[in-house]
Image (cartoon, grey):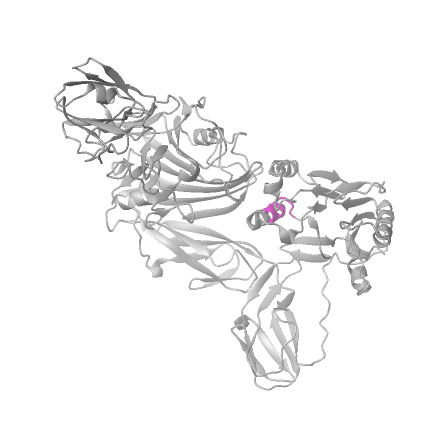
Amino acid sequence: MRKTSFILIFVILLSIFTVSPAFAEGIYEERSEGYIADGITLTSIKRLNGKGWYDINYITVDLNKEEVGFRLLNEDNITERNTVLGFTKKEEDVVAAINGDFFTTYGGDASPEGMMIKDSKLYMTPSTDPKYSTLTMDSEGLFSIDSFTFDIMVTSKRTNDSSKILFYNKLAHPTYLKIYDSSFGKLSPGSMEDGYEVVVEDGVVTGVYSNKEGVEIPENGYVLHNSLRYSLFLSENFQVGDEVGLSFSLSPDIENIKEAIGGGTVLLKNGEIAPFTLSDSVQPMTAVGIDETGKKLILFTVNGRTTYSRGMSFTEIATFLKELGCYSALSFDGGGSTDMAASYDGNEIKNIYSRSSYRKVINGIGITAERKENGDFKGFNASLSEETIFPGLPVKISIDSAFDEYGNSFELNTDKIKYSTDSEGTFQGNLYIPEKSGKHIISVTYEKVTRKLPLFVCDEATRITSSVKRLEATKSQQDIKFYIENDEGYSHYIGASNLDFEFEGTKGLVAKDKVTLTTENDGLLTATYRDASISIPIGEYEFEAPEVKDKFQKETDKEGFTFAVFGVNDNEDTIFTNYVTGKRNIIANACDLSAFKYIPEEVSSPSIRVTNYGREDTDHSLFIKLDNSKGSITSTKPEQWDWLSGVFKKGVKQKNVFITMPLDISKHSDEKELKIFTELLKENLKDKNIFIITFGNDNIYEVKDGIRYITTSDIPKFSYENPQAVLNKLKYAAFTITEDEVYFSFKPVI
């Protein structure tokens, strides 16, 4: 599946959509496309906007293609259910499918809410509820959405008594009179307990039954069924040998309809959003859209009720489908029934959504395509082993899948694969070794198809870190891993084969993340990569590694704008906490700006309360506050994304950006959101100094991927056993901002 990841869409408009404020505008979008067959494609979208996450999949179907078809999916026994994937496994040429109609269950069996026509044969009548509509395909292959009504009357010619039948080949509550013909199956539902059944063949009653399991349904007749508890109509009006009158009408006429399946509310009518006939709420949803010609379909699903997908409302779906060019659209069963399966990019048909289990549904919509063997090459998918790398380190290029014109798996001739780059780097087979920092585009070409893969190459490493601080002086094998870092906090694992090693005072070797000493002497191991190195003491060897500080971690006597961040005081009032609080308030009042979770009444200087969201501006710095107190930005207040989008659309002129959030970043529950958030900052705040400030149980300063993360410790409880540990923790984050520099340090409150 072709992937385009991390598309940040503030000013950039989506190429496929005409942006509408109802849904299309967002913060982030990851879009991927899969090839199913000629005229059939799968599009997957992961989107984040001011309402939350969306996991959308839709299949575009062009039925103008001769080898593309439509098929209603159901079990041979029309009361049995199956999963969407289960339906497809029974059909050799089905390449894509979604769930279909709403259904009602009775015991282990079920019936659809609406009409069902398959291969021009009527299996079930429409819903008696006018809120439900029907998707139809006529004999010319044209699709439309219609509302049907029907009328079935049965009459005893002996008594002239008549009754209306509301359910044809459907299971329903015993209150109602029902009729079953051979389309239902070989046997009727049965008349156990208080049921009553009348068998009619060639217009004459041939049997009446009660307290009996299902009876055989005649090919040239039907079975009438009701419950004696609710109605005596059958028992009082029909005896063996009686003639029976039956009238049946459907409107509009179904003579020209080849396939039909019941659905829910109409979403689009004549290109405009229709009045909805069902309750509109945000849920997992399934829908079908039709273009104005009636020959192109969109099979749509959106996941819901999960961390990474909220679901959608009818309004959102209608807007989305309209943007895709749909002229009419119909909803189908949603919630836990929402499901999609497809065979794309040469893979076997499979579920699109990963779940622990899949609901069995009553029917589905299948798309068929003829898959001939040995088709011509169509396309392939490729990926890189790394998204971010350092100069000089190799990146592996993998061919994930390849497919022919019929959607079959295709085996590439590796000798014909060509690699190229727009930057400085070399290729060794399918390995790429970049030599220059910056964005590299790697092109992979096979025949006339090219895939472009982006790679971010960091600035040169300035230091090496390791998984251990000291090794033992033993011949036993010891585990060790090395990582290279640069001043902007980009870090990457580096294998021992890429490092140079030197032992001092002892001997040994390093290979495959293992250190093996050949002598048990104390000493020093030094690892070097280009201009970066690290020394690790062995045994009792005396060695103190130089302290490495970030460029902003430094004291200053210069005059400047002072900004202080104070941890939370959740302790009971004691002499100690009251003293600390007083000292903290004095410091805050002496600053130009301070930040608290809760601003004390005694603080009169300008202060930021880091809940909710908002901004403060100075000439040199932008102070943004975001609320992630419920685990993430989206789960707390998703509308913050729209607000943040507006901030970046207007542009940030200041050199420094300080972002405060109440929850410790290490406790942020949504890793994907956090990754997108940091990518968003780097994309929109290029060449800015970015500081993310949170509150936690310790004082932490770290640099990662070009962003400075600062955690300010909550005020600790006093400990008589270890008062120094309390004082070491009792600090606040102090910034001094001058015209050209930012100075930072953790300073003691006392």
The relative height of residue 332 versus residue 464 in the rendered view (above or below) is above
x and y, in percent, of residue 742 in the image: 77, 52
Does 684 lie within the magenta span? yes
Between 337 and 203, the one lying in front of the other is 203
- Residue 511 as seen in the image, left or right of residue 558: left
The relative height of residue 89 versus residue 293 in the rendered view (above or below) is below
Q: Residue at x 55, y 67 (%)?
A: 494
Between 25 and 168, the one lying in front of the other is 168
Residue 259 in sight: no
Please tell me in which quadrant of the rendered image residue 117 appears: top left
The relative height of residue 133 versus residue 638 in the rendered view (above or below) is above
x and y, in percent, of residue 96 in the image: 33, 41
Q: Residue at x 47, y 52 (%)?
A: 453
- The magenta region covers 677-686
Residue 342 in sight: yes
Residue sitting at the far top: 160
Does 474 lie within the magenta span? no
x and y, in percent, of residue 584 in the image: 84, 50
The relative height of residue 158 versus residue 497 in the rendered view (above or below) is above
Image quarter (top left, top right, bottom left or bottom right) of the C terminus: bottom right
x and y, in percent, of residue 385 in the image: 48, 59
Predominant SS of the magenta segment: helix
Please tell me in which quadrant of the rendered image residue 704 appears: bottom right
